[in-house]
Structure formats: structure tokens, C-alpha cells
Image: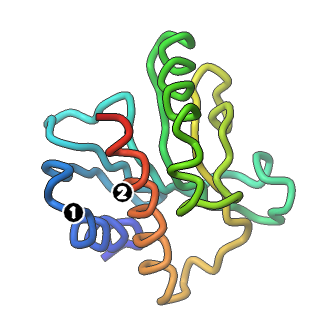
Amino acid sequence: MELFEEVAEVVRGLVPRELGTVRQRSHKYGVKVWFDTEKPTKEHYEAQVIGKRYVPEASILAIELGFHAEHPKVADNDATIAGLVKRERTWRKTLGQDAVVGEFLGRDTWRRISETWPDPDLSDPELVLELGTRLTDYITCIEPLRR
């Protein structure tokens, strides 16, 4: 099983059922998580490998994980994030200062609340659980605020 398939399984096992039906799509370099609908939504959670050009501290690659707003219109993405920023004190207690609110890395029209992990050892057996639990932290903090 690939790294992000395993991360998806961890998330599926940890996310509380009251948030809805967990949907996910994983591939070699990432996993996307959303709720209820068959098709991925424009607002979702993701853990993915990104290039070092987006993370100055990285020498090879990084992992970015957190919440994404990927609507076609910038105003929709800004509105989504603004609503979450209004409740920042609530989610910041769990997510801490590593969670960055800003433009999506590599696409300035999308928005994110996410963090980056520079140069992780992708073969580390602990990485699956670390990624899965941290992505679950984002989901359990942010998803209730979106509803």
C-alpha cells in the first residue's frame, strides 16, 4: 500500500462519524478528504508532496497538509477563509502557529489553512500515523466551523 493510501485509512478511522461520510482520493503523492458527496468538493482537506520551491526550508521536497478552498472565483475562496479566520481562536488552540492562512502554494487564486513539513523521510514508518493524525486535527477543528 502507498504512503497516502495508508494516511487515508488512518483518517477514515479517526474522523468522528458525526461529521458525515468521509470521502477520499489518494494517489502516490497525496490524499484529498471531503465529506458526503461522491465528487470531491472545492473545499476539502489534503496532504500532499510539494516541491522545494514553495518551502524555503526544504532542500528536496516538503509535505503540505491542511484545509484548501479551491473555488474558481477568488472572492469565494477569500470568503471561505474569512469565515474561518473569524473563528481562528477556536481552531488555533489545536492547530497552533504552524497553521498558515494564505494563498495556496503554487496557485494564487486558491486559499489555504495549512502547514508544511520540509524534507520528511517518506520511508519512515511513523510518518503515516503522524500525517493521518495531523490531517485529522485539521478536519476536526475546521469542519465543525464550516457547518
Q: What is the quadrant of the C terminus in the image?
A: top left
Q: Secondary structure at mark 2?
A: helix
The amino acid pointed to by label 1 is Pro
Distance from Cα at disc 2 to Cα at disc 1? 8 Å
Q: Which mark is residue 16?
A: 1
- At 64% from the left and 53% from the top, the residue drawn is 99
Q: Earlier in the sequence, mark 2 or mark 1?
A: 1
Q: Position of residue 125 (x, y in %)?
A: 48, 89
- In this view, 75 is above or below 36: above
Are circles 2 and 1 on residues that touch, CB within 8 Å?
Answer: yes
- In this view, 140 is above or below 41: below
Q: Which mark is residue 75?
A: none
Crowding around mark 2 (Cα neighbors within 10 Å: few <14, some 14 to 19, many 20+) is some
Foreground residue among 104 and 78 = 78
Q: Is residue 144 left or right of residue 118?
A: left
The amino acid pointed to by label 2 is Thr
Q: Position of residue 22 (x, y in %)?
A: 19, 53
Q: Which mark is residue 140?
A: 2
Foreground residue among 80 and 109 = 80
